Image (cartoon, rainbow, N blue to C red):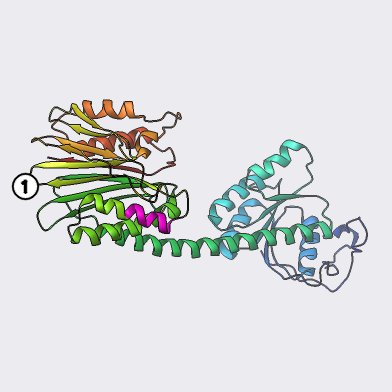
């Protein structure tokens, strides 16, 4: 549809509350005095089957430097929207072929993540109809007959909102780029300190970009194996910051075959010196001595560690025997648990996010449920994989609030 050529006639008095009708000036297309001298024009799609009303509104818009595309029904509005990508849409509610409600719904779908304001034009005043304007995708509505000052004010308001959306999109894009770079850095540092141990299975899931749980493992020159699971307080990036220096300490000290309790002491000391008050981590350290065929376990604040036999019966419970790392300046020299593993046995340790995980009904997984799960898994099934499948099924689509980590050392 061609846009009408405007004349230079000035027909409105913007100081008056009345609105000039096109019917007052027969056979003449008109424009109005500028409502706002500083108005910056945008592309506006105007859909109204009432030609007089449409011409009046179009004249107001053109008087304020806006480019106007005029159509007479919702179907034409969709065609023009797809073709010209307007910045704002004005829709009459009652139109032939396709009404404004339907057109607004389709326009919003076509716009996708881009914010394109839709303002309804309506003579309807009942609350249900006005509510339908908003529920169908409209961002505002104007009562007919339209006053130039109100129309201009509504458009400027939508331009401000659109500007805010644009700034938000730019900020989000920048933040996502920064997060992606930081996440890659964190992952590289952590993964480089998680050596592939053939008989060690692990699984983790976390709600955000970063995890406050860290799983580390290393094979020493003498054949011994060190495994460390840490769960830092908090979530996201603040919790993940501590995992970096823990991973660095673990790598440098295991390369020198430094004893596990000394590693824990150094982590505790560094956390006290670097992290702010209230930041600490619960940890389980496992040291496998192949020569002696024994395993030592330090549990500092994590849930109970379970030793499971080949029939999947829990034969020993290794409860926390020391404070989480970083709470006190000098770590107490707690005695580790000593295990003499047998063929087919497994050691299961995990973060408290597992037992605190909730399903869609708000039920926590709980330690009791976790114990029942372990003892119900057939010996022929991989223990870590079965735990993972059960937890994923339990949580479903429920949004996680904590990191979940599980490690299983099979003997």
Assign the C terminus to one quadrant of the image.
top left
On the image, the x and y values in percent for residue 103 come to 62, 49
Q: Which one is nearer the viewer's eye here, 49 or 266?
A: 266
Which residue: 42% across, 46% down?
233
- The rendered magenta stretch, by its main secondary structure, is classed as helix
Residue 192, compared with residue 92, is above or below; it is: below
Q: Which one is nearer the viewer's eye here, 311 or 92?
A: 311
Which residue: 56% across, 56% down?
111
273 magenta-colored: yes
Magenta segment, which residues?
A: 267-275
Residue 27 appears in view: yes
Q: Is residue 193 left or right of residue 95?
A: left
On the image, the x and y values in percent for residue 134 come to 67, 44
* Secondary structure of residue under mark 1: loop
Residue 284, compared with residue 64, is above or below; it is: above
**Residue found at the far bottom of this picture:** 8
Which residue: 43% across, 51% down?
236
Residue 97, compared with residue 308, is above or below; it is: below
């Amino acid at each position: 549809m061609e846009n009408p050529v405007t004349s230079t006639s000035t027909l409105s008095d913007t100081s008056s509350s009345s609105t000039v009708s096109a019917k007052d000036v027969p056979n003449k297309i008109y424009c109005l005095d500028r409502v706002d001298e500083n108005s910056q024009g945008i592309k506006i799609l105007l859909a109204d089957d009432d030609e007089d009303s449409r011409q009046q509104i179009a004249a107001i818009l053109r008087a304020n430097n806006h480019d106007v595309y005029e159509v007479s029904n919702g179907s034409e509005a969709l065609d023009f929207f797809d073709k010209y990508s307007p910045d704002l849409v004005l829709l009459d509610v009652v139109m032939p072929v396709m009404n404004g409600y339907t057109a607004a719904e389709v326009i919003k779908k076509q716009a996708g993540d881009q914010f394109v304001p839709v303002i309804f034009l309506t003579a309807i005043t009942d609350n249900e109809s006005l509510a339908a304007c908003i529920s169908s995708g409209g961002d505002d509505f104007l009562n007919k007959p339209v006053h130039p000052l109100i129309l201009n004010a509504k458009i400027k308001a939508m331009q401000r909102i659109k500007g805010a959306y644009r700034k938000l999109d730019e900020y989000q894009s920048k933040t996502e780029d920064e997060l992606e770079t930081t996440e890659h850095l964190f992952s590289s540092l952590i993964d480089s300190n998680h050596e592939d141990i053939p008989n060690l299975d692990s699984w983790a899931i976390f709600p955000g970009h970063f995890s406050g749980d860290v799983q580390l493992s290393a094979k020493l020159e003498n054949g011994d194996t060190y495994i460390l699971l840490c769960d830092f307080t908090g979530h996201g990036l603040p919790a993940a910051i501590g995992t970096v220096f823990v991973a660095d300490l673990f790598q440098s000290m295991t390369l020198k075959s430094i004893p596990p309790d000394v590693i824990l002491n150094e982590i505790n000391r560094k956390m006290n010196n670097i992290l702010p008050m209230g930041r600490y981590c619960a940890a389980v350290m496992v040291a496998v001595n192949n020569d002696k065929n024994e395993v030592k376990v330090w549990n500092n604040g994590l849930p109970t560690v379970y030793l499971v036999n080949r029939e999947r019966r829990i034969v020993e419970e290794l409860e926390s025997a020391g404070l989480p790392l970083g709470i006190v300046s000098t770590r107490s020299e707690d005695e580790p648990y000593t295990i003499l593993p047998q063929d087919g046995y497994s050691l299961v340790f995990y973060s408290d996010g597992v037992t605190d995980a909730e399903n869609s009904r708000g039920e926590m997984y709980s330690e009791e449920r976790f114990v029942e799960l372990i003892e119900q898994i057939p010996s022929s099934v991989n223990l870590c994989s079965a735990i993972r499948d059960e937890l994923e099924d339990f949580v479903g689509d429920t949004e996680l609030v904590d990191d979940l980590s599980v490690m299983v050392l099979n003997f």
